[in-house]
Structure formats: C-alpha cells, structure tokens
C-alpha cells in the first residue's frame, strides 16, 4: 500500500446508494488489505470499517476508503457512541460521523449496545450494564438522538458477556425487542457474541436466537474467539478462525430467518487476504443455499 491514492471527488454523487439487500458476505477492512480489497471482484462482497478511523477531513486512509467505495459497498460499525451510558452521545462525534456517512454513503450503519465512556473519558472496552427500566429509557433516547442526527436507521449489536450481572428487569432478547419497537432501529446479531456469552453464562444459544424477530435483523457478524488459561472462560478476541460452533449457529439462524448481510471480523492476528476470502466464501455459500422467504 502507498500513501499516494487520491480521494474520488463527489463519490456520493457518482455511486447510487446501495441498500443492504445488495449485500452478501463481507469482510472487515484492514489497511494492509486495501489493495487486495480494491482489486477483488466477488458477487455480494462488501467491506466494513470502524468509522472512528476515518472521521477526518483528509489523508491517505480516507482516500483509500473512498477508492474502495468506488468498487464495493461499505458499512460503518461504530465502537464509541456509548449508547448505554448515562449521557447523550457526544454531539461533535455525531456530526463527524454524519459527515463520513454523507461522504461514503454506507449501506449499513451500526453500533454496540454497551457503554464505553464515563465522565468524558473513553475506555477500551464495550461494557455491559443492568437491563433496567431506567437503562431502557436511556438507551432508547440515545439511539433516537443518534438516528435523528444521522438521518439513518441503525443496527444495534448484542453484547458479549463474561459473568452474570445482577439487577436485570428484562431478558436480553426482550430488551432488544423493546428497543427496536420504541426506536425503529434494527439489530446486528453477532453470532460469536451469542456463542461466547452462552458458554460463559450457561444459557442455550439456539433459544436466544429463536427469541429474535426475523424482521429486526439487519446484519450478522461472525468472528473467532479464544479461551482463558484454564479454558473455562471464552473471550471475544476476534483473533482466530471462526469456531465450528459459531458456524453451526449461523446456519441455524439463516435457516430460520433467511439471508442477511453477514460480516467476517478479524481484528488481531490478521491473516493474509486469501485466508479471509476462504471464510467469506463459506459464509456466502450458506446465504446462497438459504431458502427465499423463510418465515420467522
């Protein structure tokens, strides 16, 4: 990769807005793969990035993103809006995100159901919270403000859990359903999060997926995980190939709800691009084999 690529002027005017229905299986975009991503041509392929890395006025990274957008659909997957915090999303951050959305016209915009900021300090984790009535009102208000500012429906990702937190008024799936009902947002179902949380909390992952309404699901994520030293706790590390148990849950969900845009995440120990394409082909084959119009 070089730093000489120039932005494509007026990209939002040149390319039509692509909806999620045009997306098949996609990959998380990493800087070391920019040239490979630009060159590859596969039906339904798309790329997802964390917008925080591109919310700037210019420079080579943004130029490459625009260049790839000239060939492939994009999705923006945020990690720092802190929608579950006891404070409104940062207004300046939202405006920068809106500017990026207008610039690259992503097919999907998503964020985590978590908090990551406290007293104006950001933390490097997406932290869970007790699903109380108060939290429900706060989360819905923050999602509403975000969607109103961005002018876009967004998808909210289910969190990963490592221990049981007391004080819940809602099950997670009921909480998510109520958030969707009140705000009109959609869901990003992270299958690896479901698998890891089900192991760590000793719950049934299939029952969890069964409780999610098909029409709420806008996107699916697949990723690998690791275990702690004694193998008892699973960690949502995104640093390994997708586990066979995660593949099985993905097949189970697609069989029930039908095809959805699905994203392969790899954030550490990132392999060569062809290895990621192999996982992408497997994910796409599940979509291609799914029945059309599956009932919820």
Image (cartoon, rainbow, N blue to C red):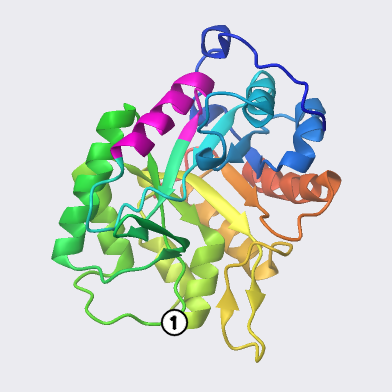
Where 54 sits versus 237, above or below? Answer: above
Where 207 sits versus 156, above or below? Answer: below
Which residue is at a point 66% across and 23% down the rendered structure image? 63
Main SS category, magenta section: helix
Q: Is residue 292 left or right of residue 72?
A: left
Which residue is at a point 48% across and 34% down the rendered structure image? 108
Q: Work out whether residue 68 or residue 125 is closer to the camera in this orientation and state it.
A: 125
The reply to whether residue 222 is in sight is yes
Q: Residue furthest bottom?
A: 230
Query: What residue is shown with label 1?
Result: 201
Magenta span includes 100:
yes
Q: Is residue 37 left or right of residue 288?
A: right
* Mark 1 burial class by Cα count in 10 Å: few <14, some 14-19, many 20+: few
Q: How many marks?
A: 1
Where 96 sits versus 197, above or below? Answer: above
Where 57 sits versus 154, above or below? Answer: above
Magenta span includes 77:
no
Q: Work out whether residue 106 or residue 22 is closer to the camera in this orientation and state it.
A: 106
Which residue is at a point 57% across and 68% down the rendered structure image? 236
Q: Secondary structure at mark 1?
A: helix
Image coordinates for residue 221, horizontal then vertical, percent: 56, 52
In the image, the segment drawn in magenta is 91-108
Q: Which of the 4 quarters of the picture holds residue 226?
A: bottom right
Image coordinates for residue 216, horizontal then vertical, percent: 36, 45
Which residue is at a point 59% across and 24% down the rendered structure image? 58
The reply to whether residue 184 is in sight is no
Image coordinates for residue 234, horizontal then vertical, percent: 58, 78
Q: Work out whether residue 102 or residue 162 is closer to the camera in this orientation and state it.
A: 102
Q: Which of the 4 quarters of the picture holds residue 23?
A: top right
Image coordinates for residue 70, horizontal then vertical, percent: 66, 18
């Amino acid at each position: 990769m070089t730093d000489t690529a120039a932005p494509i002027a007026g990209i939002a005017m040149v390319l039509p807005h692509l909806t999620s229905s045009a997306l098949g299986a996609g990959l998380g975009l990493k800087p070391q793969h920019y040239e490979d991503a630009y060159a590859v041509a596969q039906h339904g392929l798309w790329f997802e990035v964390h917008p925080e890395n591109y919310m700037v006025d210019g420079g080579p990274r943004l130029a490459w993103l625009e260049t790839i957008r000239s060939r492939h659909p994009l999705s923006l997957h945020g990690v720092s809006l802190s929608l579950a915090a006891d404070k409104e999303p940062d207004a300046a951050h939202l405006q920068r995100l809106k500017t990026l959305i207008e610039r690259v016209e992503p097919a999907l915009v998503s964020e985590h159901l978590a908090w990551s900021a406290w007293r104006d300090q950001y933390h490097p984790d997406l932290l869970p919270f007790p699903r109380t009535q108060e939290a429900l009102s706060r989360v819905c208000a923050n999602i509403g403000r975000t969607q109103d500012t961005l002018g876009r429906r967004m998808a909210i990702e289910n969190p990963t859990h490592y221990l049981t937190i007391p004080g819940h008024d809602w099950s997670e799936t009921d909480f998510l359903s109520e958030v969707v009902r009140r705000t009109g947002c959609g869901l990003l179902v992270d299958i690896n999060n479901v698998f890891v949380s089900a192991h760590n909390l000793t719950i049934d992952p299939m029952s969890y997926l069964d409780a999610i309404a098909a029409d709420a699901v806008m996107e699916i994520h697949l990723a690998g995980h690791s275990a702690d030293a004694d193998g008892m706790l699973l960690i949502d590390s995104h640093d390994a190939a997708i586990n066979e148990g995660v593949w099985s849950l993905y097949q189970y969900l697609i069989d029930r709800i039908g095809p959805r845009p699905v994203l392969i995440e790899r954030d550490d120990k990132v392999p060569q691009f062809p290895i990621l394409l192999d996982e992408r082909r497997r994910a796409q084959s599940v979509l291609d084999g799914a029945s059309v119009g599956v009932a919820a």
